[in-house]
């Protein structure tokens, strides 16, 4: 770079021609960079994955802007004495402002590249070290790291004593730790939830206080749940971490299982009962065909033979509607087939003295 600044002034003594030469030079550099990325995009279109294209597209524009700003710094550096006179007061401030913009652009670009990278890897079954439920933790951790490094570089750029700032930040951090212990508790609980992953976004969960709904978002401080009434509940992570959670989307199947108990009279044909129950389950539009509905003869009750009809549904919020539909059909079908549904009875004998 120094060689360029030595050669160009030898081409002409006219300062405007020198300025024009520098501008043309950096336009040429930008053109070469643009063609280079165009070639990379063309080559990446032939690969099996879209990750390389996304990364190239993400980097292309910020890199062009950074090169342009860097060229502006070099040009101002060479001609500041001629055009500005007071180099220290104006030129150095201008350079620091431009460098600050460059740091911010690079930080934003790096964060986008990291996000694209982790999102792509989380969708691959063969890469187990990055999972969808841990993505918020990775994203937030990287944002904190990028922010810290960017802040450090910006402070160094403006000649701020970083050691004094870190010492002050340590004292302030201790004071804030005592003042915001609940918030810190929520933050750590959020990290444990993301790592342990008792639930993920889209799961239907039930808490100790019977609040239930779909998990909309798992944040560092809180978890957002959307109820069946379309009401969003925001629950601090420290509360969830200390609660018993029923995840109705957990287990080997992502669907929810319903167990519907039925009792029939002792004179009933159990094979007929089993067939009727399976037919009713198959005819219900809310019941999933995989896994298939099942009937279990569980025990001999005091006044009835006890069965359980096991069915699976796609959406947990359909539980009440599905149970209502199946119970109505069972009652009507049993009545039509003259299958007795017994109920507890007591005979009271009154003796007269």
Image: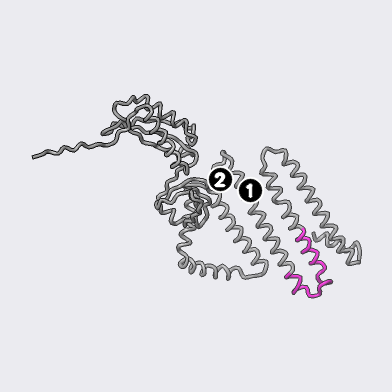
- Within-10-Å neighbours for mark 2: few <14, some 14–19, many 20+: some
Position of 38 with respect to 319 (left or right) is: right
Name the mark on residue 80. none
Position of 254 with respect to 349 (left or right) is: right
The residue singled out by tag 1 in the image is 116
The x and y percentages for residue 314 are 50, 39
Please name the predominant secondary structure of the magenta segment in the image. helix
Between 253 and 5, the one lying in front of the other is: 253
Q: Is residue 234 above or below residue 49?
A: below
Q: How is the image coloured?
A: one colour
The x and y percentages for residue 123 are 59, 42
Q: Is residue 155 magenta?
A: no
Q: Give the image quarter of residue 100.
A: bottom right
Q: SS for tag 2?
A: loop
Report the quarter where the C terminus lies: top left
User: Residue at coordinates 78% horizontally, 47% vertically from top-left?
Assistant: 36
Cα distance, mark 2 to mark 1? 12 Å
Q: Earlier in the sequence, mark 2 or mark 1?
A: 1
Q: Give the image quarter of residue 256.
A: top left
Q: Which residues are magenta?
A: 68-93
The residue singled out by tag 2 in the image is 130
User: Residue at coordinates 80% horizontally, 54% vertically from top-left?
Assistant: 30
The x and y percentages for residue 308 are 37, 33
Q: Farthest residue in the left direction?
A: 353
Report the quarter where the N terminus lies: bottom right
User: Residue at coordinates 74% horizontally, 41% vertically from top-left?
Assistant: 43
């Amino acid at each position: 770079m120094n060689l360029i600044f030595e050669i160009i002034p030898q081409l002409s003594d006219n300062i405007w021609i020198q300025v024009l030469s520098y501008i043309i030079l950096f336009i040429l550099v930008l053109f070469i960079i643009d063609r280079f990325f165009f070639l990379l995009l063309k080559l990446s279109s032939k690969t099996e994955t879209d990750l390389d294209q996304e990364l190239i597209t993400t980097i292309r524009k910020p890199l062009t802007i950074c090169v342009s700003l860097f060229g502006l710094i070099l040009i101002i550096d060479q001609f500041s004495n001629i055009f500005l006179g007071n180099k220290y007061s104006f030129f150095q401030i201008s350079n620091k402002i431009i460098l600050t913009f460059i740091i911010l652009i690079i930080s934003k670009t790096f964060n986008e590249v990291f996000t694209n990278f982790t999102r792509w890897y989380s969708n691959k079954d063969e890469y187990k070290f990055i999972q969808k439920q841990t993505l918020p933790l990775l994203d937030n951790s990287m944002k904190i790291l990028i922010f810290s490094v960017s802040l450090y570089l910006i402070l160094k750029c403006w000649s701020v004593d970083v050691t004094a700032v870190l010492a002050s930040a340590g004292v302030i951090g201790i004071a804030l730790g005592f003042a915001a212990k609940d918030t810190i508790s929520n933050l750590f609980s959020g990290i444990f939830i993301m790592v342990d992953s008792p639930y993920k976004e889209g799961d239907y969960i039930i808490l100790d206080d019977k609040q239930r709904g779909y998990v909309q978002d798992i944040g560092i401080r809180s978890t957002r749940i959307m109820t069946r009434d379309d009401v969003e509940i925001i629950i601090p992570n420290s509360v969830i971490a200390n609660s018993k959670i029923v995840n109705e989307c957990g287990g080997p199947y992502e669907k929810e299982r319903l167990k519907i108990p039925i009792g029939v009279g002792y004179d009933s044909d159990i094979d007929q009962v089993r067939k009727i129950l399976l037919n009713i389950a198959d005819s219900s539009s809310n019941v999933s065909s995989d896994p298939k509905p099942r009937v279990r003869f569980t025990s001999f009750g005091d006044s009835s033979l006890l069965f359980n009809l096991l069915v699976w549904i796609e959406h947990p919020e359909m539980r009440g509607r599905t149970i209502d539909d199946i119970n109505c059909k069972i009652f009507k079908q049993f009545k039509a087939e003259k299958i007795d549904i017994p109920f507890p009875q007591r005979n009271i004998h009154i003796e007269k003295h």
